[in-house]
Every structure is written in C-alpha cells, then in structure tokens.
Image (cartoon, coloured by chain):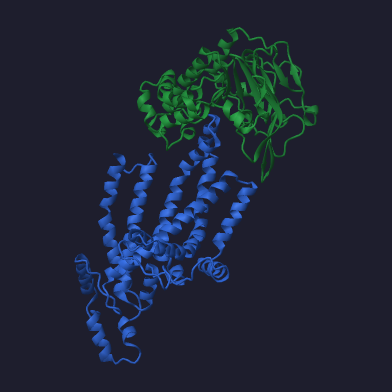
Chain colours: A blue, B green
Amino acid sequence: MRVFGYARRRMFFLPLGLLSVIVLAFLLVNALPGNPAGVIAGPAASPAELAGIERRLGLDKPLWERFTDYVGALVRGDFGSSYYTDRPILSEILRFAPATLELVVLSLTIAAVLGVGLGVLGAYYKGRSADRTSRLVVTTFQSIPDFFLALLLIYLCFYLAGWAPAPVGRLGLMDEPPPTVTGALLIDALISGDMRTFRSAVAHSLLPVLTLGIYYSAYFARSTYASLVPALESKQVEFARACGLSERTVLAYAFRQARTPILTYGGILLAALLGGAAIIETIFSWGGFGEWAIDSILQLDIPAVQGFILAAGVGTLLVFTALDILVAVLDPRVRYD
Amino acid sequence: MSALSAIRRSRNRPARPDTDTSGHRLLEVSGLTTRFDTPDGLVQAVNGVDLHVDRAEIVGVVGESGCGKSVTIRSILGLVRPPGRVVGGTAHFNGVDLLTLRGAELRRLRGKDIGFIAQNPFSALNPVMRIHRQFRNIMAAHDPASAGEVRDRARAALADVGIAGPGRVLDGYAHQLSGGMAQRVVIAMAMLLNPAFVIADEPTTGLDLTVQRQILDLIRGLVREHGRSMLLVTHDLGVVAQYCDRVVVMYAGKVIEHGSVRDVLTAPRHPYTQALIRAIPRPGRPLVHLTGRPPDLVDYPDGCPFRARCPHAFEPCGHTVPEPVTVASGQTYRCHLREDGEVGL
C-alpha cells in the first residue's frame, strides 16, 4: 500500500519532467552555434540559396514561434523530419533505439554479474589476497578506455583467434535480418524461429557486449565494495553471526543492506549509456542510437538532435522513476510523506 | 537507580563462595590475548584476561570505554574480525576450548548454547527484513527441521519478553518498534534456543532510564528463572551492584580486580576500582572524577598500566607488572599497594 501510494505520487511528476525535457531539448539545440542551412547548402552557396533553405526549414521564424510549432507537432506525434534523409524522426528513433537498448541491457547485465561478483569477493575477503586480486582486476578493467578495449578484443578475438565475427554490425553482411517486431534483433530472430540468424546475432553482439560489460563491471565492483565493506563490519552482521547464522546467510544480510546503492548506480549507468555508448556502437558499426545522434550532431540535423535529446531524456526519466519505486519496494524504511 | 543503595543492599546478600569447584564452572577464560594489527601499530586490546562464570551466576564486567570489555566477549564468541586476532589464551565452555573451535563448530554454539544480547537493537536487527524472517533464519541455522514451528516458537519467545502483540511485531520491521520493544526482540532472539549462557553487551546503553531498569529486570528474570549464567558487560557500577553476583573490573585490556560484588564494591582494593566507585554520583558527597586518560594501547606502558593516573603510584609501579593478590574471600586484585584501600562508603 505504502509503495503504491508512493509510485502514484512519483508518476504524477512524470509530465512535469517531460515538459522540462522538451524545453531543454529545444533550447539546447537552438542555442547551438552553427547554421544548418550553411552546412546543407555547402560553402559555395549564394545568400539567396541560403535564405531559401532557411525558409524551407522554418529557421527564418522567431524562436518562440519555432518552439510553439515544435511542441504542437510533438503533441500530434510528429517529431519532425531529418534535414538530410527526410525520414520522420520518430521512425528513426524507433529504428535505432532498440539496437542500443539491446546492447546496453545485455552489457549492463554482464557488468553487474561480473562487477558485483568481484566486489563481493573483495569486500568479504577484505585485506586478504582475494581482495588484492579483485582490486587489481577492477583497476585494470577501469584503466583501459572502452574504445581501446573494443579494438583490443577485435584484434585478439577476431583478427588473431577468429572466435568472433568481424565488427560489421548486428548481423553478418550475408545474413537475412528477421522481420522487425520489437527492433531487438535477438528477440526478433527468436520470434521468427530463425536459429541461424539468432546464432549470428549472438556472435555479433559478443564483442561489443563484452567490451561494455568488462568496462562497466569496474563501476559495479567499486560501488559493491564501497557499500558492502561497511555492511559487513556493521553491528547487524555481527549480531547475525552471534546468533549462529551461516556465513552465507550473513553475507546475504550484508548484501541486503548494500544493494540499494548498487542498484542506484546501475540505474544511473543504464540512463547514461542510452546515449553514451556511441563510440562502441561506431566501432562495431552497431547502427545504434548514440551513433545516430553523433552523426546528427555533426551534420547539425536539428530535428534529429532534438529527437535524440527528447528520447534519451524520456528514457532517463523513466529509468529514474522506476529506480525510485524499486528502491521503495526494497527498503521498508524509505518514507516520502 | 541509586547505585549506593544498590551497593548497600548487596551487602546483605549472602556472599557466594568463590571456590573452584569445576562442576559449577561453565566458562573459564584464561590468558586471553587479542591484538589488532592496524596501520597505526599493533593495538594490545586484551592482555591476558582471566575470568570465569559459574553455573547460574551473573558476572559483571566493568571498565571505561576502550578497556577491552567488548573485545573480550567478542574474542570468546569468535567474533573478532581481521585486522583483529586472538593470539593467546583459552576459553573453556562446558569443557570445550572455544578458541580452538573451527568456524562451523563455533557457529553451532553461538545462538544455541550461548545467547548474545547486543548493545543497540536498531543496529543489531536487520532493518530491511521482517522480524519473523530473522527468527526463522536463526532457527533454520541450528535446526533446519524446525521450519514449521518458527511462528509458534517466535511468538512464545516474544511473549516471554513481555511483548503483548507478538504477531504484529513479527510481521513488521525493526524501525517500527520503540527502543525498548526492539531490545526485547533482541533478547527474545538471544533466548530463543534456550541457551545455558548469555552474554549481554551493555544491553541498555541506548535506552531511556525508565526502560533500562525494565530491560535489566527482564534479562535477570529470564536468566535466573531458567538457571542460566550471564556475562553482563556494563560501565555502570550501579547495574553491577544490583544485578550481578560477581564483578570483573578491567583496565587497559587487563583484569585489575575481581571478586564478589559485595567485596569489590564495599572494599575495593585497586585504586582504579576505588576511583570508579568515587565517581558514582551520590547525594551529600562531591563527585570525584578520575582525571587523565587510559594508556595508549599501541605503545603499551611498562609496569602497571594504571600508574599514570594512580594517586598512590610509587617506585615499583613504573617497571614491574603487579602480580594478582588474592585475599581471604577470593577477591583478587593487581596492585603493588598492600594496605587496605577502603574508601569508606
């Protein structure tokens, strides 16, 4: 009951957050330096040509008018069209976002399992050789930049060993993509029952998922270690031991205490990676959300950039809301009256 | 409570003969030594502690903060964690040396044969787990077959500690309870499996004065009623006077005096015990504070550790550790002074 009430109140703030994201998306992009008309027309264009392009894109109108046009279109479900491809932004988002979501969710799962494992090992055996080993591994994982790790893995696993397929995207060049249902290839391949495509999709996601998984496992390991060490030294754990509970139960008690910060950290990483995996997506030609955003920014494709900011903002908003509700479910002490 | 009146009452109680009849002896600790290897150096927290608890006896352990009381009981229970380490001594419980037991063997004794009452219930109880589940885990740890009777046993244990609505408490969380109620839950957990021996670590420190007395009465009742023994750690001599049979006074990780409560509180032999008694507030007498601080446990002093604060320190105190001296009634103290240190209550 307490949690339902809280969840309702928390959802109540979603529209407010959404409005801020819209305003922010509009202002950020329109405050960016650079004239998209100039980029589209090229350096040799005459002033008359420039003015024509500006008029066509609506850039000659005052800021507030552009804003009301933008919001009005959003309400109708029209996110605008790309200046370059003329494709509707909404369908672009729906095309690119599932690829990234798939990559990020898989990577964070690997990162959480690996990182929490390393953190638990280090915290439980604090000061002993297992702790030192864990810390060495974590420091190594964290000190290798993710793009370098990606190139290293490609070199080792594709070029030298041949275990992994070439970094050409989510499928091989000769693979037939399954009919789009969810946009997530692995799920779509399973739905269509095409096991050959599914295996190819798994093989192609191996290296990017491993790259992000290894890199971000260090963050999970550090937050696990940081919250589990005091939990293991707490009076609560001592009392559990004094009651004769097994070490496994004692560790579970400590983990229960430590899980909220770990979960919060995971949520923040998830939100950040929705647009932040661009470099890895580019290296693996993933065709993801972040990659699309970078291309759009470099081309000053304003509707696309606005669409990206809006989608990433809404994604972040949803992740954080879900996170807050989850924390309230997990921790009975949380009160929000 | 008035410490003085409690001490006076204890005079009228028949003294327990302090004779070594090992049939009575439940716990016998000797030469217990515990060190902490910290970055600042080796902390000599417990230095050769000898103490014993007989059957159906309540023994108080008193001393200032940092005198090694808690480390002593944690050493006995095997709860000292790295960087701490028990480096010497024995702790025979029912004839078994607890210090030689392996993890799982010691774990089976904890909670079942030795109950532990923690200092602050809100840090001891799991904040994010229903009380019922915490009871269930304790029972499952010692008797996996008992799963079906958890609720009945837990209700009975809570009723024994005077909780009126045990069902409601079991279904709730620790933070929903008052301090006194939460401490009753901790006591119920400690007594759940009917231990013969209870260790209480300053069980009333965080509670209101009015509740303190109720809790101590409750603990004493549960101990006496079932013929249990208890080691009661406290820094309050009034509590010792009222609730204990014998008392062990610790200073700088050493037992500096022990004996029956009547003997030690009415005729303290060690200057430190005398100072502790003088520091009890009582009407009509100025409060005499003990000045100075306990010695640095990393750079442990030679000779008597109390020397720096002792009003009677003389030549041998600086280099010779006083040997224990036992007087007729079994009262034992470690001091070079031989004259009677009566402070005259």
Q: Position of residue A125 (x, y in %)?
A: 60, 44
Q: Does B16 sit left or right of A202 as displayed?
A: right
Out of A212 and B284, give the one closest to the viewer. A212
- Residue B274 appearing in the image: no
Q: Does B175 sit left or right of B264 as displayed?
A: left
Q: Residue at x 63, y 46 (%)?
A: A127
| Residue A335 figure quarter | top left
Task: Please say if A163 is above or below B328.
Answer: below
Label count reads 0
Task: Please say if B323 is above or below A92.
Answer: above
Out of A256 and A174, give the one closest to the viewer. A174
Task: Please say if B197 is above or below A104.
Answer: above
| Residue A303 figure quarter | bottom left
Q: Residue at x 43, y 54 (%)?
A: A266
- Residue B41 appearing in the image: yes
Q: Position of residue A133 (x, y in %)?
A: 62, 52
Q: Position of residue B150 (x, y in %)?
A: 43, 25
Give the quadrant of the C terminus of chain B.
Answer: top right
Out of B264 and A335, give the one closest to the viewer. A335
Q: Position of residue A321 (x, y in %)?
A: 33, 52
| Residue A67 figure quarter | bottom left
Q: Residue at x 34, y 78 (%)?
A: A300
Task: Please say if A71 is above or below B186.
Answer: below
Q: Residue at x 27, y 43 (%)?
A: A5
